[in-house]
Image (cartoon, rainbow, N blue to C red):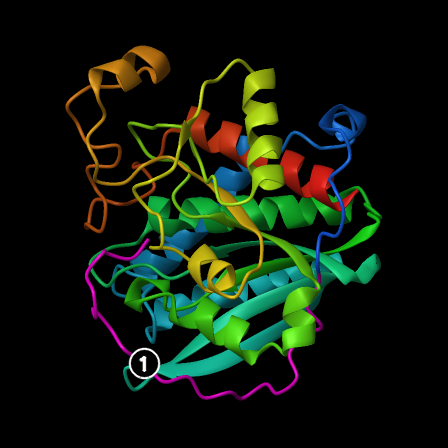
Amino acid sequence: MKLSIPGRASATAVVTVAALLTGGSIAGAAPAPEAVAAAAPDLPVANVKAHLAQLQSIATANGGNRAHGRTGYKASLDYVKAKLDAAGFTTTVQQFTSGGRTGYNLIADWPGGNTSQVVMAGSHLDSVTTGAGINDNGSGSAAVLEAALAVARSNYQPTKHLRFAWWGAEELGMVGSRYYVNSLTTANRAKISGYLNFDMIGSPNPGYFVYDDDPTIEKTFKTYFTGIGVSTEIETEGDGRSDHAPFKNVGIPVGGLFSGADYIKTSAQAAKWGGTAGKAFDACYHSSCDTSSNINDTALDRNADALAYAVWTLSA
Protein backbone atom coordinates (compact mmCIF):
# COMPACT_ATOMS: atom_id res chain seq x y z
CA MET A 1 0.00 0.00 0.00
CA LYS A 2 1.37 3.37 -0.94
CA LEU A 3 2.07 6.10 1.56
CA SER A 4 -0.62 8.77 1.73
CA ILE A 5 1.50 11.66 0.50
CA PRO A 6 -0.06 13.94 -2.14
CA GLY A 7 2.06 14.18 -5.23
CA ARG A 8 4.41 11.51 -3.94
CA ALA A 9 5.06 10.29 -7.46
CA SER A 10 4.09 11.14 -10.96
CA ALA A 11 4.59 8.87 -13.88
CA THR A 12 3.88 8.51 -17.52
CA ALA A 13 2.80 5.15 -18.82
CA VAL A 14 3.88 3.92 -22.22
CA VAL A 15 1.93 1.00 -23.63
CA THR A 16 3.72 -1.93 -25.16
CA VAL A 17 0.71 -4.23 -25.27
CA ALA A 18 -2.05 -2.60 -27.30
CA ALA A 19 -5.59 -3.95 -27.03
CA LEU A 20 -5.39 -5.53 -23.60
CA LEU A 21 -8.27 -7.80 -22.80
CA THR A 22 -11.94 -7.24 -22.96
CA GLY A 23 -13.29 -5.79 -19.76
CA GLY A 24 -16.17 -7.32 -17.87
CA SER A 25 -19.10 -6.44 -15.54
CA ILE A 26 -20.96 -8.16 -12.55
CA ALA A 27 -24.42 -7.44 -13.89
CA GLY A 28 -27.34 -8.19 -11.65
CA ALA A 29 -27.38 -9.12 -8.01
CA ALA A 30 -25.04 -11.78 -6.72
CA PRO A 31 -26.61 -15.15 -5.91
CA ALA A 32 -27.45 -15.86 -2.30
CA PRO A 33 -24.09 -16.64 -0.64
CA GLU A 34 -25.43 -19.84 0.90
CA ALA A 35 -26.06 -21.17 -2.59
CA VAL A 36 -22.35 -21.18 -3.41
CA ALA A 37 -20.80 -21.65 0.01
CA ALA A 38 -20.24 -25.36 -0.55
CA ALA A 39 -18.55 -24.69 -3.88
CA ALA A 40 -16.08 -22.10 -2.62
CA PRO A 41 -12.83 -23.83 -1.65
CA ASP A 42 -10.92 -23.54 1.59
CA LEU A 43 -7.57 -22.24 0.37
CA PRO A 44 -4.78 -24.08 2.20
CA VAL A 45 -2.83 -21.45 4.11
CA ALA A 46 0.26 -23.63 3.67
CA ASN A 47 -0.01 -23.07 -0.09
CA VAL A 48 -0.34 -19.32 0.36
CA LYS A 49 2.69 -19.31 2.67
CA ALA A 50 4.67 -21.35 0.14
CA HIS A 51 4.15 -18.55 -2.39
CA LEU A 52 5.27 -16.04 0.25
CA ALA A 53 8.41 -18.09 0.86
CA GLN A 54 9.19 -17.88 -2.84
CA LEU A 55 8.68 -14.11 -2.84
CA GLN A 56 10.97 -13.81 0.17
CA SER A 57 13.63 -15.89 -1.59
CA ILE A 58 13.31 -13.69 -4.68
CA ALA A 59 13.76 -10.54 -2.59
CA THR A 60 16.74 -12.00 -0.75
CA ALA A 61 18.42 -12.85 -4.04
CA ASN A 62 17.73 -9.41 -5.52
CA GLY A 63 18.99 -6.78 -3.13
CA GLY A 64 16.37 -7.39 -0.43
CA ASN A 65 13.36 -6.00 -2.27
CA ARG A 66 10.87 -6.55 -5.09
CA ALA A 67 10.37 -2.90 -6.00
CA HIS A 68 9.29 -1.36 -9.30
CA GLY A 69 12.01 -1.38 -11.92
CA ARG A 70 14.22 -3.73 -9.90
CA THR A 71 15.18 -7.30 -10.73
CA GLY A 72 13.21 -8.61 -7.76
CA TYR A 73 9.95 -7.30 -9.16
CA LYS A 74 10.40 -8.92 -12.57
CA ALA A 75 11.43 -12.20 -10.91
CA SER A 76 8.27 -12.05 -8.76
CA LEU A 77 6.13 -11.53 -11.86
CA ASP A 78 7.87 -14.40 -13.66
CA TYR A 79 7.16 -16.70 -10.70
CA VAL A 80 3.46 -15.87 -10.65
CA LYS A 81 3.13 -16.05 -14.44
CA ALA A 82 4.76 -19.48 -14.63
CA LYS A 83 2.28 -20.87 -12.10
CA LEU A 84 -0.68 -19.44 -14.00
CA ASP A 85 0.55 -20.56 -17.41
CA ALA A 86 1.00 -24.11 -16.14
CA ALA A 87 -2.53 -24.04 -14.70
CA GLY A 88 -4.16 -23.13 -18.01
CA PHE A 89 -4.73 -19.39 -17.69
CA THR A 90 -4.32 -16.99 -20.58
CA THR A 91 -1.75 -14.51 -19.30
CA THR A 92 -0.88 -11.07 -20.61
CA VAL A 93 2.02 -8.91 -19.48
CA GLN A 94 1.32 -5.19 -19.83
CA GLN A 95 4.36 -2.94 -19.84
CA PHE A 96 4.60 0.71 -18.79
CA THR A 97 7.24 3.16 -17.64
CA SER A 98 7.45 5.12 -14.39
CA GLY A 99 10.34 7.16 -13.07
CA GLY A 100 12.45 6.10 -16.01
CA ARG A 101 12.09 2.41 -15.14
CA THR A 102 10.08 -0.29 -16.84
CA GLY A 103 7.12 -1.69 -14.93
CA TYR A 104 4.78 -4.58 -15.57
CA ASN A 105 1.23 -5.67 -14.86
CA LEU A 106 0.27 -9.32 -15.11
CA ILE A 107 -3.29 -10.18 -16.17
CA ALA A 108 -4.62 -13.75 -16.11
CA ASP A 109 -7.93 -14.76 -17.67
CA TRP A 110 -9.62 -18.06 -16.93
CA PRO A 111 -11.12 -19.38 -20.17
CA GLY A 112 -14.91 -19.36 -20.35
CA GLY A 113 -17.67 -17.41 -18.73
CA ASN A 114 -19.52 -14.41 -20.06
CA THR A 115 -16.88 -11.87 -21.08
CA SER A 116 -19.50 -9.13 -20.88
CA GLN A 117 -19.64 -9.81 -17.14
CA VAL A 118 -16.12 -9.92 -15.71
CA VAL A 119 -15.23 -10.41 -12.06
CA MET A 120 -11.69 -9.28 -11.28
CA ALA A 121 -9.53 -9.93 -8.23
CA GLY A 122 -6.19 -8.18 -7.93
CA SER A 123 -3.28 -7.11 -5.76
CA HIS A 124 -0.07 -5.16 -6.15
CA LEU A 125 3.04 -7.26 -6.54
CA ASP A 126 5.68 -4.60 -5.92
CA SER A 127 7.35 -3.83 -2.62
CA VAL A 128 8.98 -0.63 -1.46
CA THR A 129 12.75 -0.42 -1.97
CA THR A 130 13.46 -0.78 1.76
CA GLY A 131 12.28 -4.37 2.16
CA ALA A 132 10.86 -7.59 0.80
CA GLY A 133 7.24 -6.49 1.18
CA ILE A 134 5.91 -9.83 2.39
CA ASN A 135 2.81 -8.44 4.08
CA ASP A 136 2.73 -5.37 1.80
CA ASN A 137 1.88 -6.90 -0.51
CA GLY A 138 3.13 -10.42 -0.85
CA SER A 139 0.17 -11.44 1.31
CA GLY A 140 -2.47 -10.21 -1.13
CA SER A 141 -0.50 -11.36 -4.16
CA ALA A 142 -0.01 -14.88 -2.80
CA ALA A 143 -3.66 -15.25 -1.83
CA VAL A 144 -4.90 -14.05 -5.22
CA LEU A 145 -2.50 -16.48 -6.88
CA GLU A 146 -3.70 -19.39 -4.75
CA ALA A 147 -7.35 -18.50 -5.47
CA ALA A 148 -6.60 -18.53 -9.18
CA LEU A 149 -4.85 -21.90 -8.89
CA ALA A 150 -7.87 -23.23 -6.96
CA VAL A 151 -10.06 -22.19 -9.88
CA ALA A 152 -7.88 -24.29 -12.15
CA ARG A 153 -7.63 -27.28 -9.79
CA SER A 154 -11.41 -27.48 -9.51
CA ASN A 155 -11.96 -26.63 -13.18
CA TYR A 156 -14.47 -24.07 -11.97
CA GLN A 157 -16.82 -22.94 -14.73
CA PRO A 158 -18.61 -19.82 -13.49
CA THR A 159 -21.34 -17.99 -15.32
CA LYS A 160 -19.24 -14.83 -15.37
CA HIS A 161 -15.71 -14.46 -16.68
CA LEU A 162 -12.87 -14.50 -14.15
CA ARG A 163 -9.81 -12.30 -14.39
CA PHE A 164 -6.94 -12.00 -11.93
CA ALA A 165 -4.34 -9.22 -11.85
CA TRP A 166 -1.01 -8.36 -10.23
CA TRP A 167 -0.13 -4.67 -10.44
CA GLY A 168 3.23 -2.97 -10.74
CA ALA A 169 4.34 0.34 -9.20
CA GLU A 170 1.49 0.62 -6.72
CA GLU A 171 3.95 2.03 -4.22
CA LEU A 172 4.57 4.96 -6.59
CA GLY A 173 0.90 5.93 -6.69
CA MET A 174 -1.11 3.05 -8.19
CA VAL A 175 0.72 3.54 -11.48
CA GLY A 176 0.17 0.06 -12.92
CA SER A 177 -3.50 -0.30 -12.06
CA ARG A 178 -4.23 3.23 -13.24
CA TYR A 179 -2.47 2.48 -16.51
CA TYR A 180 -4.56 -0.66 -16.96
CA VAL A 181 -7.84 1.16 -16.31
CA ASN A 182 -6.87 4.01 -18.62
CA SER A 183 -6.00 1.52 -21.35
CA LEU A 184 -9.53 0.09 -21.38
CA THR A 185 -12.18 1.46 -23.69
CA THR A 186 -15.35 2.82 -22.14
CA ALA A 187 -17.19 -0.28 -23.36
CA ASN A 188 -14.67 -2.63 -21.78
CA ARG A 189 -14.75 -0.76 -18.48
CA ALA A 190 -18.51 -1.24 -18.46
CA LYS A 191 -18.03 -4.99 -18.71
CA ILE A 192 -16.23 -5.16 -15.37
CA SER A 193 -18.96 -5.84 -12.87
CA GLY A 194 -16.64 -5.79 -9.89
CA TYR A 195 -13.00 -5.41 -8.93
CA LEU A 196 -11.86 -6.99 -5.64
CA ASN A 197 -8.63 -5.64 -4.09
CA PHE A 198 -6.37 -7.38 -1.60
CA ASP A 199 -3.58 -5.23 -0.16
CA MET A 200 -2.07 -6.35 3.18
CA ILE A 201 -4.16 -9.25 4.48
CA GLY A 202 -1.71 -10.94 6.86
CA SER A 203 -0.76 -8.14 9.26
CA PRO A 204 0.98 -9.43 12.42
CA ASN A 205 -1.35 -7.56 14.81
CA PRO A 206 -4.38 -7.87 12.56
CA GLY A 207 -7.72 -6.25 12.22
CA TYR A 208 -10.47 -7.39 9.88
CA PHE A 209 -11.48 -4.52 7.64
CA VAL A 210 -13.92 -4.63 4.71
CA TYR A 211 -14.21 -1.95 2.02
CA ASP A 212 -17.66 -0.32 1.99
CA ASP A 213 -17.58 1.01 -1.59
CA ASP A 214 -20.06 -1.38 -3.24
CA PRO A 215 -22.95 -2.79 -1.18
CA THR A 216 -23.12 -6.18 -2.88
CA ILE A 217 -19.39 -6.84 -2.60
CA GLU A 218 -19.29 -5.54 0.97
CA LYS A 219 -22.19 -7.78 1.98
CA THR A 220 -20.51 -10.81 0.41
CA PHE A 221 -17.37 -10.37 2.51
CA LYS A 222 -19.34 -9.62 5.66
CA THR A 223 -21.46 -12.73 5.16
CA TYR A 224 -18.32 -14.85 5.06
CA PHE A 225 -16.86 -13.37 8.23
CA THR A 226 -20.19 -13.59 10.05
CA GLY A 227 -20.27 -17.26 9.13
CA ILE A 228 -16.94 -17.90 10.85
CA GLY A 229 -17.80 -15.72 13.85
CA VAL A 230 -15.38 -12.87 13.13
CA SER A 231 -16.50 -9.26 13.50
CA THR A 232 -15.42 -6.75 10.87
CA GLU A 233 -15.07 -3.00 10.63
CA ILE A 234 -15.28 -0.66 7.68
CA GLU A 235 -11.88 -0.05 6.10
CA THR A 236 -10.78 3.60 6.26
CA GLU A 237 -6.98 3.59 6.66
CA GLY A 238 -6.26 2.64 3.07
CA ASP A 239 -9.17 4.43 1.40
CA GLY A 240 -7.91 5.76 -1.93
CA ARG A 241 -4.40 4.45 -1.26
CA SER A 242 -4.49 1.17 -3.17
CA ASP A 243 -5.31 -0.28 -6.55
CA HIS A 244 -9.08 -0.18 -6.21
CA ALA A 245 -8.96 3.62 -6.52
CA PRO A 246 -8.43 3.83 -10.31
CA PHE A 247 -11.34 1.41 -10.84
CA LYS A 248 -13.60 3.29 -8.44
CA ASN A 249 -12.73 6.60 -10.07
CA VAL A 250 -14.23 5.48 -13.40
CA GLY A 251 -17.37 4.02 -11.84
CA ILE A 252 -16.44 0.34 -11.61
CA PRO A 253 -17.83 -1.34 -8.44
CA VAL A 254 -15.01 -2.17 -6.04
CA GLY A 255 -14.49 -3.98 -2.76
CA GLY A 256 -11.76 -5.67 -0.81
CA LEU A 257 -10.12 -6.68 2.44
CA PHE A 258 -7.38 -5.22 4.62
CA SER A 259 -5.77 -6.23 7.91
CA GLY A 260 -4.19 -2.88 8.83
CA ALA A 261 -0.97 -0.94 8.33
CA ASP A 262 0.52 1.72 10.61
CA TYR A 263 -2.65 2.79 12.39
CA ILE A 264 -2.77 1.81 16.06
CA LYS A 265 -5.01 -0.98 17.32
CA THR A 266 -7.42 0.29 19.98
CA SER A 267 -8.35 -1.47 23.18
CA ALA A 268 -11.81 -2.19 21.77
CA GLN A 269 -10.28 -3.73 18.67
CA ALA A 270 -7.90 -5.86 20.72
CA ALA A 271 -10.83 -7.09 22.80
CA LYS A 272 -12.65 -8.04 19.63
CA TRP A 273 -9.83 -9.51 17.56
CA GLY A 274 -7.02 -10.30 19.98
CA GLY A 275 -3.54 -8.94 19.53
CA THR A 276 -1.96 -5.95 21.23
CA ALA A 277 -3.72 -2.66 21.90
CA GLY A 278 -1.60 0.46 21.46
CA LYS A 279 0.54 -1.18 18.79
CA ALA A 280 0.36 -0.77 15.01
CA PHE A 281 -1.46 -3.41 13.01
CA ASP A 282 1.81 -3.81 11.12
CA ALA A 283 4.81 -2.29 12.90
CA CYS A 284 6.99 -3.33 9.94
CA TYR A 285 4.93 -1.42 7.38
CA HIS A 286 7.26 -0.16 4.62
CA SER A 287 10.29 -1.34 6.60
CA SER A 288 13.09 -3.84 6.21
CA CYS A 289 11.43 -6.11 8.78
CA ASP A 290 8.47 -6.81 6.46
CA THR A 291 9.77 -10.32 5.84
CA SER A 292 8.25 -13.79 5.95
CA SER A 293 8.22 -13.56 9.76
CA ASN A 294 5.89 -10.53 9.55
CA ILE A 295 2.72 -12.53 8.89
CA ASN A 296 -0.15 -13.63 11.11
CA ASP A 297 -1.16 -17.04 9.79
CA THR A 298 -4.71 -16.87 11.13
CA ALA A 299 -5.43 -13.53 9.44
CA LEU A 300 -3.84 -14.73 6.21
CA ASP A 301 -5.91 -17.92 6.28
CA ARG A 302 -9.21 -16.18 7.02
CA ASN A 303 -8.72 -13.45 4.45
CA ALA A 304 -7.60 -15.89 1.75
CA ASP A 305 -10.70 -18.00 2.32
CA ALA A 306 -12.88 -14.87 2.26
CA LEU A 307 -11.25 -13.95 -1.04
CA ALA A 308 -12.13 -17.33 -2.52
CA TYR A 309 -15.67 -17.14 -1.13
CA ALA A 310 -16.21 -13.75 -2.79
CA VAL A 311 -14.77 -14.87 -6.13
CA TRP A 312 -17.01 -17.94 -6.22
CA THR A 313 -20.09 -16.10 -4.96
CA LEU A 314 -19.87 -13.09 -7.27
CA SER A 315 -19.00 -15.07 -10.40
CA ALA A 316 -21.52 -17.92 -10.05
Residue 282 in view of the camera: yes
Residue 236 versus residue 157 in the image, above or below: above
Q: What stretch is highlighted in magenta?
A: 1-24
Residue 22 painted magenta: yes
User: Percent position (x, y) of residue 154?
Assistant: 80, 41
Mark 1 lies on a secondary structure that is: loop
Report the side of 113 relative to 100 (left or right). right
- What secondary structure is the magenta-colored segment mainly? loop
* Mark 1 crowd level (few <14, some 14–19, many ≥20, 10 Å Cα): some
* 233 in the magenta segment: no
The residue positioned 81% from the left and 45% from the top of the image is 156
* Residue nearest the viewer, comparing 198 with 232: 232
**Can residue 111 be seen?**
no
Expressed as whole percent of the image width and height from the top left, the position of residue 38 reads: 77, 25
For residue 212, above or below residue 240? above
Q: Is residue 285 left or right of residue 90?
A: left
Give 185 or 305, whichever is nearer the viewer: 185
Q: Where is residue 101 in the image (x, y as percent from the top left)?
A: 33, 83
**Residue drawn at x 49%, y 58% as measured from the top left:** 248
Residue 281 place in picture, x, y as percent? 26, 32
Determine which residue is flagged by label 1: 11
Q: Going by the image, does 134 lie left or right of 152? A: left
Residue at image location 33% in from the left, 35% down from the top: 203
The correct choice, above or below, for 194 with respect to 22 in the image is above
Residue shown at the point (67%, 43%) measured from the top left: 311
Q: In this view, does 186 lie to the left or right of 162?
A: left
The C terminus appears in which quarter of the rendering? top right
Question: Callout 1, which amino acid?
Answer: Ala
* Farthest-out residue, left: 278
